[in-house]
């Protein structure tokens, strides 16, 4: 009988868990090394706001949500959102599609129950988990871990890194691993916040009255990209699904700002994307005895927050000028001056350069060492896309290793 190969998976997030569940237990002795006292910490944190596991849209459109699409697409084709939902069902987790077309566990199933179902699969696959083991680089060809006050060394046949990005340090995802790869001459791209709040220098009187209010059913535009959604005004700035979808373009402009090419990033809001500019002009012109504010409230259905924003960006004469106000309503400018702190971001962009890995996710200059998950330099919006890519990547690598 052929001897099993040993495989060490460093990190216990979504991509690592799927990899360990999907590897052939008859071929591999599988070990997970996790720095926390439990696996799936970020997985559970993601479930606090409603456990959005994936999205139900067509896989062709699904792939368009990622940057770079060319990198992520093979993983999705190998293990799609439908495949993921079917896999969850096979381990006892029924799902349903919400009104937003996002996929959730059936009502009553808590995030911890999903994690326990996955851990049950790990047990069936005879996966060993070493908790409180923090990876600390290499000693020649051996992996180094600190475990409480002990130094642990091991030399597995194969190594898979699944160390996460650089946000939500409380879950163990802090990006501290980058220095070890730098020592090996492996290129690391700078981490930036993604799917995060963005800083706006609001008028103090406005923010005192309107912080926490939502801008619903709007269309948000940055650069050449427009997305419908909603956002919340906060003391710090603005955040929400409509903003997260533009993270890549906002980041591009803020990075250019760092390089002194731009003063700040520009975000535009269409308060009424379902009404044409001509229709808005018509309603403003035919106001009868109503004031401008009353027309905006009653005929265009703007909220008090939206109306106040219009006032802030116009003089008294401009506010009562039909042409100016209708244009402003359809293309309201906001100036974004900074990211939220990286640790507050839902995810990060940057990490181990994609040029450093081959199509099998093996590090080109470090044979038998692989990389999966958020520690690689790719990006996706919230809504199930981040988790799906991590699970798909884990499954893809497992399938590749199982046939080698």
Image (spheres, grey):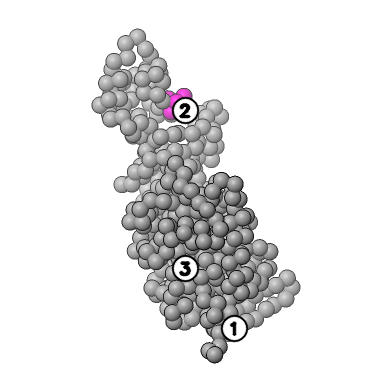
Label 2 to label 1, Cα distance in Å?
A: 60 Å
At x 62%, y 60%, the residue is 116
Return the mark for residue 155.
1
Residue 380's quadrant in the figure? Answer: bottom left
Residue of label 2: 305
Q: How crowded is mark 2: few (under 14 residues within 10 Å), some or many (20 or more)?
A: some
Residue 291's quadrant in the figure? Answer: top left
Residue of label 3: 395
Mark closer to the observer (3, 1): 3
Return the mark for residue 103.
none
Mark closer to the observer (3, 2): 3
In the displayed structure image, the side of residue 387 where residue 224 appears, left or right: left
Q: Position of residue 396 (x, y in %)?
A: 44, 69
Screen quadrant of the C terminus? bottom left
User: SS for tag 2?
Assistant: helix
Tell me which numbered mark, 3 or 2, is placed earlier along the sequence. Answer: 2
What span is in magenta? 303-308
Determine if the magenta segment contains residue 182: no
């Amino acid at each position: 009988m052929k001897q099993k190969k040993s495989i060490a998976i460093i990190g216990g997030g979504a991509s690592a868990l799927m990899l360990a569940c999907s590897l052939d237990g008859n071929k591999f002795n599988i070990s997970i090394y996790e720095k926390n006292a439990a696996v799936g910490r970020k997985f559970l944190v993601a479930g606090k706001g409603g456990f959005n596991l994936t999205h139900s849209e067509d896989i062709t459109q699904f792939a368009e949500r990622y940057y770079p699409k060319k990198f992520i697409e093979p993983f999705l084709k190998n293990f799609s959102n439908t495949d993921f939902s079917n896999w969850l069902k096979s381990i006892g987790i029924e799902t349903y599609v919400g009104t937003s077309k996002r996929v959730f566990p059936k009502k009553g199933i808590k995030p911890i129950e999903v994690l326990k179902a996955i851990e049950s699969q790990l047990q069936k696959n005879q996966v060993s988990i070493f908790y409180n083991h923090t990876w600390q680089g290499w000693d020649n060809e051996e992996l180094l871990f600190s475990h409480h006050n002990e130094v642990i060394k091991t030399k597995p046949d194969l190594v898979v890194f699944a160390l996460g990005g650089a946000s939500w340090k409380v879950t163990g995802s802090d990006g501290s691993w980058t220095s070890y790869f730098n020592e090996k001459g492996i290129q690391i791209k700078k981490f930036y916040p993604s799917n995060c709040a963005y800083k706006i220098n609001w008028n103090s009187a406005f923010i005192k009255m309107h912080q926490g209010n939502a801008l619903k059913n709007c269309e948000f535009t940055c650069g050449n990209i427009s997305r419908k959604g909603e956002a919340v005004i906060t003391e710090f700035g603005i955040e929400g699904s409509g903003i997260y979808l533009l993270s890549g373009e906002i980041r591009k402009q803020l990075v250019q700002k760092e390089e002194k090419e731009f003063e700040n990033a520009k975000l535009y809001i269409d308060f009424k994307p379902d009404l044409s500019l001509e229709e808005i002009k018509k309603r403003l012109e035919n106001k009868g005895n109503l004031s401008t504010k009353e027309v905006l409230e009653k005929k265009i259905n703007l909220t008090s927050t939206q109306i106040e924003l219009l006032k802030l960006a116009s003089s008294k004469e401009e506010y009562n000028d039909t042409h100016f106000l209708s244009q402003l309503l359809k293309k309201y400018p906001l100036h974004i001056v900074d990211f939220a702190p990286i640790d507050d971001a839902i995810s990060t962009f940057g990490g181990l350069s994609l040029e450093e890995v081959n199509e099998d996710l093996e590090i080109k200059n470090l044979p038998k060492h692989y990389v999966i998950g958020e520690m690689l330099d790719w990006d996706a919006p919230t809504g199930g896309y981040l988790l799906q890519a991590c699970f798909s990547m884990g499954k893809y690598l497992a399938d590749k290793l199982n046939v080698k």
